[in-house]
Amino acid sequence: MRRICSWATTTEVSDRYPLRVYYEDTDATGVVYHANYLKYFERARTEWLEARGLDHMGLARDHKIVFTLADLRLAFKRPARLDDRLVVVTTALEPGRVRMVFKQEIWRDNSCLIQGEFTVACVNITTFRPARLPLVMTEER
């Protein structure tokens, strides 16, 4: 699935991850509790990996690497509410040797609810020292 994010250039391909807001995701006012957006973004990045034939357990087992969140920035625009149907749009930007930046947005219909930028670092599972990103992550975005 392709979509160009509002901040993406025309050459960046984005993945889409649909989700629904459940009662367990909301606070007393019926809006999504702010920390749950981080879960939605994490799920979408995991699906981004899966779409490229990668999974966290396989990378840990076969390559002795894991990913850690090195930096994140969020901009809340509008709240998501109980029973909303949302789409998380994930765009991988130019990767470094050991880090990759993801731009992510959560949409409801034609409204962007939240924007995020996540820097993910690849580290050795034993030493937690920086490790090279898998080639498939650096070749095709």
Image: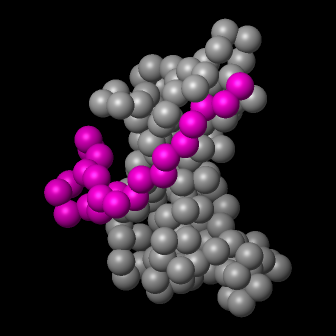
Q: Residue at x 58, y 26 (%)?
A: 83
- The stretch in magenta equals 1-23
Q: Is residue 21 magenta?
A: yes
Residue 11's image quarter? bottom left
Q: Is residue 46 left or right of residue 103?
A: right
Q: Is residue 90 left or right of residue 124?
A: left
Q: Residue at x 67, y 81 (%)?
A: 59
Picture coordinates of residue 45 (x, y %)? 54, 58
* Image quadrant where one finds the N terminus: bottom left
Q: Nearer the viewer, residue 46 or 101?
A: 46
Picture coordinates of residue 41 (x, y %)? 56, 47
Q: Looking at the image, which residue sits at the far left?
A: 10
* Image quadrant where one finds the C terminus: bottom left
Q: Is residue 82 left or right of residue 104?
A: right
Q: Residue at x 51, y 20 (%)?
A: 79
Picture coordinates of residue 134 (x, y %)? 53, 83
Q: Nearer the viewer, residue 81 or 7?
A: 81
Q: Is residue 71 left or right of residue 100?
A: right
- How many numbered marks are there? 0
Q: Looking at the image, which residue sits at the far right?
A: 126
Residue 77's image quarter? top left
Picture coordinates of residue 113 (x, y %)? 43, 28
Q: Is residue 58 above or below residue 16?
A: below
Q: Nearer the viewer, residue 99 or 27?
A: 27
Q: Looking at the image, which residue sits at the far top?
A: 29
